[in-house]
Image (tube, helix red, strand yellow):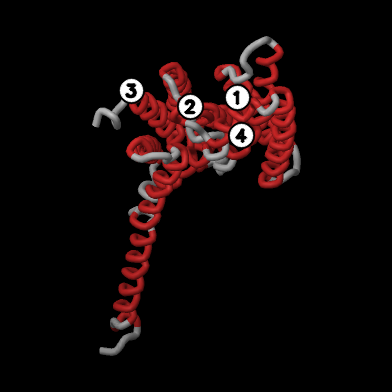
């Protein structure tokens, strides 16, 4: 037990759980607003920001891999990508899926080119940046968790303060605009929340897999309830438990990456919800359809419906 429940395990567990809860809550609004794939766009859009921050650190005489600076670069680039996506959808005739492909392609292409520049500048020394793409949660330290806690607290506070406005934006954006709500600003605020989760998840599950921490818990919670409040609580709980389970499974075995395990645990929760969720689950829907058919057959055989005496 001593080898399993180490200080590092507790640190990683705390950081991952914070990410899972925050991603689950923010993901509900992203899913209901049909912005689930924005996290994927943000993850790819953050790459040039990471590369530019790395180069800036070198020019300033730093080590290159300066974690706060890299996270700042990722946040700026991710915010720019999300804002570009929102503005394209708002002020042009470009459809949303095409806008996502354009933004993702441009930013990812720029990031790939800049990563080559970084690699040449360091003679291959930029290999450590790969952990930001695919995650390396075992490298988390106490200061990272404190930063996670600050970002999580800020994101959750915004969700609480803007809950009514975001709910109205998700369910009826036209009505929201008609009563004077700043729809564009609310969309940008939602994009900023997604960026905060993507940046937080950069060091744990990685920029490529961070979309799963947003989408999967919210999609799983949708099978259990139609009410926003319970959905937020349930999605945050699923996200937190999936993150914790992934870390603990990783700590119990050798050479098991925690980031992918977190995603797989969330996917398992989604699978259970898909099958057994009382609102939209396969089993519940099948039972309801069978009940309706049986009721229809009974009604059809009665005299009131022209049946025989």
Estimate the spatial distance between the alpha carbons at disc 3 and disc 1, rounded to whole Å.
Answer: 29 Å
Is the residue under label 2 in contact with that under label 4 (CB below 8 Å)? no
First along the sequence among labels 3 and 1? 3
Label 3 CA crowd tier, 10 Å (few <14, some 14–19, many 20+): few
Q: CA distance from mark 3 to mark 2?
A: 37 Å
| Mark 1 or 2, nearer chain start | 1
Q: Is residue 116 left or right of residue 135?
A: right
Q: Give the number of the mark in front: 3 or 2.
A: 3
- The residue at which mark 3 appears reads as 7
Q: Looking at the picture, does residue 230 appear above or below residue 70? A: below
Q: Are marks 3 and 2 in contact (CB under 8 Å)?
A: no
- Distance Cα–Cα, label 1 vs label 2: 21 Å
The quarter of the displayed image where residue 175 is located:
top right
Report which residue position mark 1 lands on.
75
The residue that appears at 29% across and 83% down in the rendered structure is 303
* Image disc number at residue 162: 2
């Amino acid at each position: 037990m001593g080898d399993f429940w180490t200080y590092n395990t507790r640190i990683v567990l705390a950081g991952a759980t914070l990410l899972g809860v925050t991603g689950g809550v923010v993901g509900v609004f992203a899913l209901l607003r049909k912005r689930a794939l924005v996290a994927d766009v943000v993850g790819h859009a953050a790459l040039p920001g990471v590369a530019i921050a790395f180069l800036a650190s070198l020019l300033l005489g730093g080590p290159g891999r300066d974690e706060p600076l890299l996270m700042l670069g990722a946040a700026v680039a991710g915010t720019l990508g999300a804002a570009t996506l929102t503005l394209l959808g708002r002020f042009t005739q470009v459809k949303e899926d095409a806008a996502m492909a354009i933004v993702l392609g441009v930013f990812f292409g720029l990031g790939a080119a800049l990563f080559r520049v970084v690699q040449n500048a360091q003679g291959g020394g930029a290999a450590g940046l790969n952990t930001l793409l695919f995650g390396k949660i075992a490298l988390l330290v106490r200061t990272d968790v404190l930063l996670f806690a600050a970002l999580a607290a800020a994101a959750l506070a915004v969700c609480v303060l803007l809950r009514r406005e975001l709910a109205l934006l998700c369910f009826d954006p036209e009505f929201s605009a008609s009563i004077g709500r700043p729809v564009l600003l609310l969309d940008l605020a939602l994009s900023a929340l997604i960026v905060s989760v993507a940046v937080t998840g950069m060091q744990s599950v990685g920029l490529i897999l961070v979309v799963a921490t947003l989408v999967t818990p919210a999609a799983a919670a949708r099978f259990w309830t139609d009410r926003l409040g319970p959905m937020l609580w349930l999605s945050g709980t699923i996200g937190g438990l999936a993150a914790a389970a992934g870390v603990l499974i990783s700590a119990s075995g050798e050479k098991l990456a925690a980031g992918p395990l977190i995603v797989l645990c969330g996917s398992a929760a989604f699978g259970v919800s898909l099958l057994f969720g009382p609102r939209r689950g396969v089993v519940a829907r099948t039972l309801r359809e069978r009940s309706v058919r049986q009721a229809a057959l009974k009604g059809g055989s009665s005299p009131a419906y022209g049946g025989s005496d």
